[in-house]
Amino acid sequence: MKLHLISNVNSEWFQDKFGEEDYNLPDADVVIFTGNCSNFIRRTMNQVESVAMMYPEKQFIINLGMKELTAQKNFTEIRDGVNNRQMLYENWPKNLHFKYQKPLKLEVNDRKLDILCLYGFPNVGNVDETVWKNTEWYQYTFHGITHDQSYFKPKAAADVYHGHFWIWSTPELCREDHEKECEIIRNWLAEKEEGSTQILVTALSPMNDPCLEGVEYNMYPDLHPDVWVFSGVSTTMPNNRTLLHGNPGTGSDVRSVTLTI
């Protein structure tokens, strides 16, 4: 069985960087959008749904990254919207699947796949505040919404309600959410069905992701799915019992890469 990944297209609302050659997919059974295809969820969904309709014989899975999730007024708004669209939109492609933090079980060409999509929070060590705030991760990632007016009250502002505030990422919050994801993965691994292949999907690479330049981190130590696919870094390598694979970017060379599992 062959997998193909699509990520880090980095399209913008006014500029689609998903070129003509990117619609020419290789011979693959399953295509996974691992995250950060654009800065706007509508642009990402247009890309995803268009490609899925072009290849009804392939199965498509979508995960959302930090760039798709910034323009929302509460922490689950965009994922809830995609999930509702999947359930209610009559033209949603039958071969396109979205599920977050819960196992997605598919049978493709007599092969059982058990897929878990997560955001991918890093376990961050000590880092200088200036380095942290210069990262792309910090510029895009938040951990929720607060209406506590003391959280980010502008200087000399009146003591009135100023609306909601995003809780922007800190190393401490990353470590907390990383541990929550570890627990989800532990439970998922413990419930593996005989004969199935477990595939973990994250929008962050477990090593050297450019969005965390200058920051030392690790992810999910001692947790070993069969395959781990991600955004951010181009690589194919074994790591203990797990096969790691990333395939970010656009163009004919990137679109020709597949992973055999």
Image: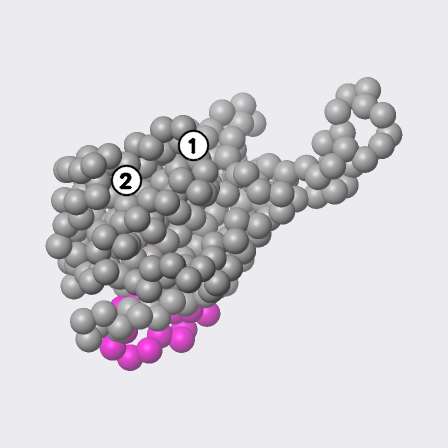
Relative depth, front residue between 4 and 178: 4
Q: Is residue 245 magenta?
A: no
Q: Nearer the viewer, mark 2 or mark 1?
A: 1
Amino acid type, callout 2: Pro
The residue where tag 1 is placed is: 13
Quick check: can you spot residue 203?
Answer: no
Structure colour scheme: one colour
Give coordinates of residue 88: x percent, y percent: 48, 63
The residue segment tinted magenta is: 186-204
Residue ID at (24%, 34%): 19
Name the image quarter holding residue 170.
Answer: top right
The residue where tag 2 is placed is: 248
Residue ID at (47%, 64%): 87
Give coordinates of residue 186: x percent, y percent: 44, 66
Give left or right: position of 195 versus 96: left
Relative depth, front residue between 18 and 104: 18
Give left or right: position of 65 versus 20: right
Q: Is residue 194 magenta?
A: yes
As helix, strand or loop, the secondary structure at mark 1 comes to loop
From what the image shows, is residue 192 above or below residue 127?
Answer: below
From what the image shows, is residue 74 above or below residue 93?
Answer: above
